Image (tube, coloured by chain):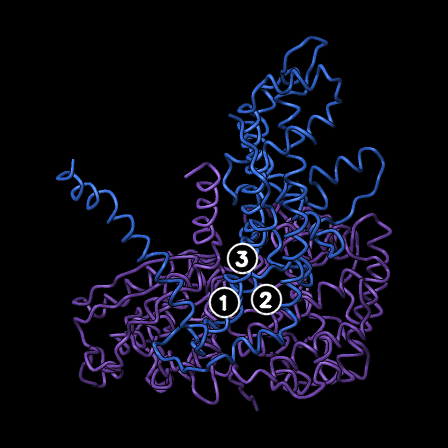
Chain colours: A blue, B purple
Amino acid sequence: MRHGKWPLIVTFLVPPVLLYVVFVVSPYLQAFQISTTDWLGYSADANFVGLENFRNLWRDDYVWNALQNNAILLVLVPVVTIVLGLFFSSMLTMGGRKGRAGIGGVRGTAFYRTVYFFPQVLSVVIIALLWKEVYHPNKGLLTSALNGIGLSAPTWLGDPATAFWCVLAVMVWSNVGFYVVLFGAAMSAIPKEIYEAVMLDGASRLTTLRKVTIPLLWDTVQVAWVYLAIFALDGFILVQLMTNGGPNFSTDVIGVRMYDTAFGSETKFGYASAMGVVMFFLTLSVAVLALRAGRRERIELS
Amino acid sequence: MNRRDILRRTAAAGLLATPAAGLLAGCATGGGDDSDGTDAYQGTKSEQNPLGVKEDAPLEVVIFSGGFGEEYAKAHEAMYTERYPKATIKHSATQEISKTLQPRFVDGTPPDVVNNSGAGQIDFNGLVSQNALADLGELLDAPSLDVPGKKVRDTLLPGAVEVGSYDGRFLVLNYTYTVYGIWHSTKLLTERNWAYGKTWDDHIALCRQIKAAGIAPWTYAGIHPRYMSWPLISTAIKFGGPQVAMAIDNLEPNAWKSDAMKTAADAWHQIVKDKFILEGSPGLDHKQSQTAWSQGKAAFISCGSWLEAEQKDVTPAGFDMAVQPTPSLGSGDKLPFEAIRGTAGEPFMVPAKAKNVAGGLEYFRTMLSRKGAQDFTKKVSSLTVVAGASEGVELPHGLSTVVKALDASGANGFNWVYNNYYRKLERNLVDAACGEFFSGRIGPAEFLDQCQKGADSIAQDSSITKYKRT
């Protein structure tokens, strides 16, 4: 066995690690270095400016505005997505009772499961363009539907009062399907006997979900939380394609601000890297916090 | 290792790989020797070859493939190789100029000619302040290719050189000549027997009539509301004279709150207050609003003269689009009604570190020849900065009204360049203010305050190089 170890390591581990170091780790390290310069991106010259970029970030109202939006997303996207995901997946795996002992989903479970997963199949770019048309203020699906029943519709993405919530809704819509499947898979791993016992004791569906399902799913929920939190701190592709941060910066997120600073209306790569560094630490701390805060006693099933 | 450990480690690994945007700023700064073109191609200058082009030096041209396509450039390249048969031209076209070329600028191996345009345009302030652009001054003093006895400089329309100049150095060749005005369908106006209002009061009266007829008088690109800053600033300049624009370009304190700007903003607020704007416009992008306009849902739209080419596919037959200057505020206006904003657009540049700078300049000389300019106008229905090059070319309806408007405007034509100096100010800050103003969420005073705040933030930012215009 021993003589076969090295060829395996060399062929299967070294290339991916090398690729990872070259294309992921090294750009990250460089971003740290660039964030301490005033590099403008189109020459090889850059001056070291220390923490100047970070001081400017602290005073930059547009950055604070973007961070505030990220913070709202950070709270709402995971909560709404997880609640909806748990609701749908529990309906699909144990929603139907049909008056008999035994656990099953509501009628048409297989169909729903497929439909919920649709958004996951589409690329994010397609989702953004699709919803841009749905939100079209004159002939979009939503406006037409509201007009059809005699209500007036807002201008959706054109109004700072609604644009942010429109984007948030798309974020939840595009994510929920995946978590339905994820939670569904975790739920089917829960032994049926537990549910049968709970049913014999006469617990309602809500109590079952709250007292039995969620505690047993806690690890999965926690992972979902971390992923969704990271997604909420990023949110770049959807926002950039749907609103590019507008109107009047009402949907701006830190990722869009960074992109705009480097590739959009300016070429301040040093300053943009500083935003990237801040984003890196924010994401890291949010993830660590989410994992710490979610720590509970583990329930062993066997 | 139990399941929980695996999950936790997966989550931690995911952390390192997830924020997609985080990677974007992480480009390498490593490359780039400062050879400053020691291995650049250089030929001997002569009467036939005033720029000193090396005959067999290859030339690389990168074109922005937007509304104009890339066929016109291939024609210019063919004209170049006709004169220098030994030269090979490497042609490429992209929509993402900055993302494609940024690494090559850093590396010190940029192409020789770049058409820096479109949404992925590289900010010129950044390029100029890093000395990344070659001085094109020599080109202006070279003789024109096919207008005997004239230098290239003397064949250009007024203002063409100024737009591409930064502190007196001519660095950017803006090739097209664009007119900014208010567009309408001649068919719509003649059918209904409406006449374009030359004064603001007439304009408002007409808007009222149009609205009564069940058509929205105005629409605009709510996602890119800066399109509406153009007629507003134009109105102010016509009211207060060109120094209104000069003050804005030079970031003078309270330039946006000048009396002329206040009067203009108050006037334009009328179309918002009286609901003359197509409902839902704040949520439309430029294509959607222009299409609504082409479909006759709105009568007026603010745009530049690229509009006709951009709308080619959706314009109904007999629509006959036409451009008009902004209405005069009154008899006190410093400039007559006919005065219109005309400026050179569609920027081309030669990077300072290009291998074949002389070839790049020569390529520009080819573009600026009468033959090159005429071919461009024929191919893409747009004017060039070469004076009189559209003569003898059959123009589509919209463009012929552009030529007429330019003739009528004559020496009263005006322009501003703050959008070239400080891209962020127009694209981000004034843009956002226009969005609030034209959707009716803020009034004229707050609108100008917000613009001024944006201009002040640029003025106070020491990392942005400032330029002055006189």
Instruction: Give the residue at mark 3.
Output: A283
Query: Distance of mark 3 from mark 1, alpha carbons?
Result: 51 Å
Same chain for marks 3 and 1? no
Tell which subunit mark 1 falls on: B
Q: Position of residue B167 (x, y in %)?
A: 48, 89
For residue B154, above or below residue A96: below
Q: In percent of the image, x 76 and y 55: which residue is there? A: A161
Element assignment for label 1: loop
Alpha carbon distance from label 3 to label 2: 53 Å
Q: Horizontal placement of A135 versus A32: left or right?
A: right
Alpha-carbon neighbours of circle 1 within 10 Å: few (<14), some, or many (≥20)?
A: many
For badge 1, the amino acid type reads: Leu
Mark 1 touches mark 2? (CB < 8 Å): yes
**Residue B386 placement (x, y as % from top left):** 45, 74
| Amino acid at pointer 2 | Val
Provide the residue designation for mark 1.
B383
Could you tell me which residue is drawn at 62 percent across and 20 percent down? A194
Q: Could you tell me if residue A238 is visible in this image?
A: no
For disc 3, the chain is A
* For residue B47, above or below residue B199: below
